[in-house]
Image (cartoon, rainbow, N blue to C red):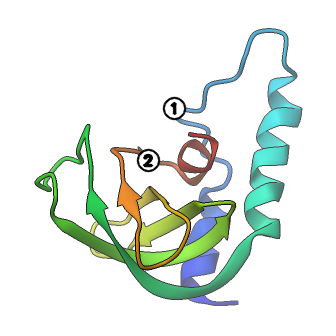
């Protein structure tokens, strides 16, 4: 397995920041999020996005941020930046026009946003 996908797998238990609606079975919901990431994993490849409002700490709005795409589906892109050991969510229909709209943290949080 690729070392970055190993990092992803090791962090899928981190539920920090994930919102679970009232009345929803939290364990089942979190398991499904993790399984959805696994179903949409890809071999890591570099992508970049424009930082959009509300922004990201350490980056200016409009700045390009690059990272490794580890999973993608329906306009959602799960990005890992080894330089800061952080996961980010990018959105957009295709690789050439992605936006980073301030979502970062655990992979589950990014995927659920």
Left or right of 37 on screen, residue 29: right
Q: Up-down: is 54 above or below 13?
A: above
Graded by Cα atoms within 10 Å as few (under 14), some (14 to 19) or many (20 or more), the crowding at tag 1 reads some
Q: Position of residue 33 (x, y in %)?
A: 76, 47
Can you tell which mark lies on residue 17?
1
User: What residue is rendered at 36% in x and 66% in y?
Assistant: 85
Decide: is 113 above or below 44. above
Compared across the picture, whether 80 is left or right of 56 comes to right
Q: Quadrant of the C terminus?
A: top right
Front residue (pair 96, 68): 96
What distance separates the C-alpha of mark 1 from that of mark 2?
Answer: 8 Å
Q: Residues within 10 Å of mark 2 (few under 14, many from 20)?
A: many
Check the picture and name the quadrant holding the N terminus. Answer: bottom right
Residue 50 is marked as: none
The reply to whether callout 1 and callout 2 are in contact (CB within 8 Å) is yes
Mark 2, residue position: 105
Element under disc 1:
loop
Q: Residue at x 56, y 42 (%)?
A: 109
Q: Secondary structure at mark 2?
A: strand
Picture coordinates of residue 71, whole percent (x, y): 64, 70
Residue 42 screen position, x and y as percent: 68, 81
Residue at 25 percent of width and 41 percent of height: 53
């Amino acid at each position: 397995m690729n070392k970055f996908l190993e990092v992803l797998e090791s962090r899928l238990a981190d539920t920090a920041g994930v919102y679970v609606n009232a009345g929803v079975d939290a364990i089942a919901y979190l398991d499904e999020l993790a399984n959805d990431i696994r179903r949409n994993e890809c071999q890591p490849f570099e992508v970049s996005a424009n930082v959009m409002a509300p922004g990201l700490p350490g980056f200016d709005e409009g700045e390009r941020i690059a990272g490794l795409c580890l999973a993608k589906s329906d306009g959602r892109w799960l990005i890992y930046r080894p330089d800061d050991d952080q996961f980010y969510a990018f959105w957009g229909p295709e690789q050439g026009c992605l936006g980073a709209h301030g979502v970062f943290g655990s992979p589950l949080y990014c995927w659920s946003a």
